[in-house]
Amino acid sequence: MPFSKKVDPMSADQGKKPGGSGGGQPPRDPNTFTQEVHYSQVSARVPEKVARGAFSTGVLVLQGPHEFVLDFVLRMTQPQLVSARVILPITMMPNVINAVDENLRGYTSRFGPPPALPVPTPPPTPPSLDEIYEQLKLTDEQLSGNYANAMMITHTPAEFCLDFISTIYPRSAVSARVYMAAAQIPGLLNTLQRAYQQFQQKIAGQQPKPGTGN
């Protein structure tokens, strides 16, 4: 896998003693170094523990200060389950939305639109986040989730396979694999779009207005 190495800028000061001239930089630890890696993602390794994937019938999207959390849920049994938890950096969200949208349009052009699911009647009072998660089984192993900064989608006439990938040197790996019925994908796309739109509105509301900020 090709890469380029960026040498630690403090390496030129290896022979200098602490307190010597070095642009105000602390002395370099000879046991540490930094490097910037660039590589092209050709394929991602699929660890055995995620190869079988997890089936999901919907998704809950949580927004943190630096990330989005996608909780893929399975509501076919009791107790209802979080079948996979994926952690995405905020900057990754538009790419995920575009990937789902592009694959849904490709699916539609080949097989026609997915069958429409019945729209459930909303409750008179929307449940709180705590009430929602009281109905979900989330194991200790799932609490930290699976980090991903890339995504690959494949589909058949019946289902979609969502591979969430961590592209970290020395090799990309699938951190979570989720299967969803084709009929669930429009709802997935809508939920992701609404979550990101709410994030953008929140950020816009935090921006100082002209003439009022520092």
Image (tube, helix red, strand yellow):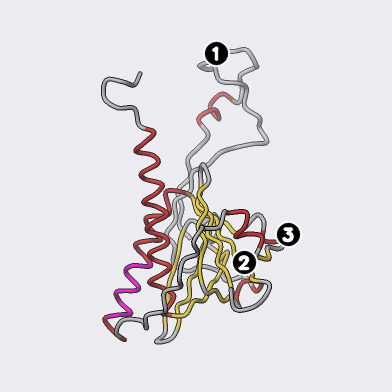
Separation of marks 1 and 3 at Cα, in angstroms = 50 Å
Which one is earlier in the sequence, the residue at label 1 or at label 2?
A: 1
Residue 23: % across, % down = 50, 16
**Within the magenta stretch, is there residue 103?**
yes
Give the numbered dot on residue 140.
Answer: 3
Residue 135 placement: quadrant: bottom right
Q: Residue furthest right?
A: 140
Please give the residue where the numbered disc 2 appears in the rendered image: 82
In which quadrant is the C terminus drawn? top left
Q: Which numbered tag is attached to residue 9?
A: none
**Which of the 4 quarters of the picture holds residue 39?**
bottom left
Q: Which mark is residue 21?
A: 1
In what element is the residue under mark 3? helix
Kind of residue indicated by mark 1: Ser
> What amino acid type should be assigned to the residue bearing mark 3?
Asp
Mark toward the start of the polypeptide (2 vs 3): 2
In the displayed structure, would residue 52 be above or below residue 24?
Answer: below
Of the numbered discs 1 and 3, the one sitting upstream in the chain is 1
Q: Residue at x 50, y 64 (%)?
A: 123
The boundaries of the magenta stretch are: 100-108
Q: Secondary structure at mark 1?
A: loop
The front one of 179 and 16 is 179
Instruction: Find out whether residue 88 is within the magenta segment.
Output: no
Horizontal side, residue 145 vs residue 126: left or right = right
